[in-house]
Amino acid sequence: MPGSTTIAPYASYPAQLLGVAGRALAQLVRTPSHSRRDAAARKLARHSLWLSAAGAALVIVLMVVFDGTEIQLMPARGTPALWPIRILTDFGKDENVLSVLGVALIVVALVAAGLHGTRRALVLGFGTRLQYLFLSVALSTFVTDILKYLIGRGRPFVGGKADPFNYIPFEGTGAYASLPSGHAATAFALAFAVSALWPRLRVFMFTYAIVIVLTRLVLLAHHPSDVTAGALVGMVGAMAVRYWFAARRLAFAIRADGTIVPLPGPLPRRLKRVARGASAP
């Protein structure tokens, strides 16, 4: 969301809200203006290529060497004692993550529409970062769904045996939507995006992503190569969205060598003061 707006302070609340929402969307599609965006684009392409090549090689190795063995070591699907894992895995479900981020964006817009000046700019600065998180997950999920349909890999034991080479492309059902893992793509896109904005959270976020991946293996929802491919899609997707934001001077800056770094964001203490001010009688 934009850091500032030109909406008249005396406008009605609905007009303020429409103005905030319109500018939040407009900033995402405006013409890139950062003078170093070409250097950042080259760096993105180089890193994406190397990451994709290494990831694809690992996926192939896991598929040939490890997938069939690993799924036979897991508990039987539907084991009652796995109920905590079934709850935990939903924290990486794309619908759940996107719903939480979407609601947070709506709340930010509603609060910002009732504020002016520095307070509005502070809340909208946080909103811009929420936009980045939401779009990183959304793009990764979209790409994952397309790949699932095109590849049509059977989930573990679909067809009655541990066959890691069970494929029916364009089949389009959940049973043949194993590669790549949507939960892994969502978790790693979110982990990368949060870490890109707030590097101190990197260990926590990637621990979360790894835990989500492990739940998918234990529940026999995916092969190891599926979750590896999903993690790759999630990270590359979040990297691409980060470049999009940085090229438009949103939430990120670009150094002379093309490295993208986070801009200083709203501090939690200042956000709390704003929230108290907005709710005060």
Image (cartoon, grey):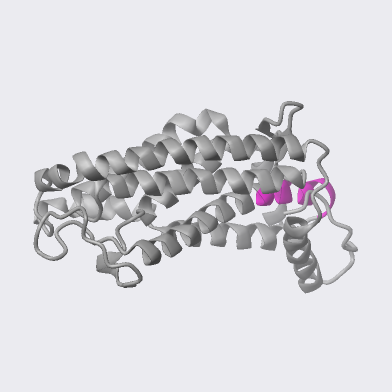
- Left or right placement of residue 69 versus residue 195 in this view: left
Q: In the picture shown, does residue 255 fall above or below 88?
A: above
Classify residue 11 as left or right of residue 218. right
In this rendered view, identify the residue nearer to me: 113 or 34.
34
Q: Nearer the viewer, residue 166 or 70?
A: 166
Count up the numbered dots.
Answer: 0
Quadrant for the N terminus, please. bottom right
Residue drawn at point x = 31 percent, y = 43 percent: 60
Q: Residue at x 44, y 52 (%)?
A: 186
The part of the image, by quadrant, that contains residue 167 is: bottom left
Q: What residue is shown at x 61% (from left), y 58% (from top)?
A: 105
Task: Give the magenta part as a residue range.
Answer: 116-128
- Apparent side of residue 160 relative to residue 205 in the rendered image (left or right): left
User: Camera-side residue: 56 or 103?
Assistant: 56
Q: Quadrant of the C terminus?
A: bottom right
Residue 174, horizontal then vertical, whole percent: 29, 68
| The magenta stretch spans residue 31 | no
Quadrant for residue 205, please give it: top left
Q: Is residue 276 visible?
A: no
Q: Judge whether residue 120 is colored magenta.
A: yes
Residue 27 in percent (x, y) is at 77, 56
Percent across and percent down for residue 123 are: 71, 49
Q: Name the outermost residue toward the top.
A: 257
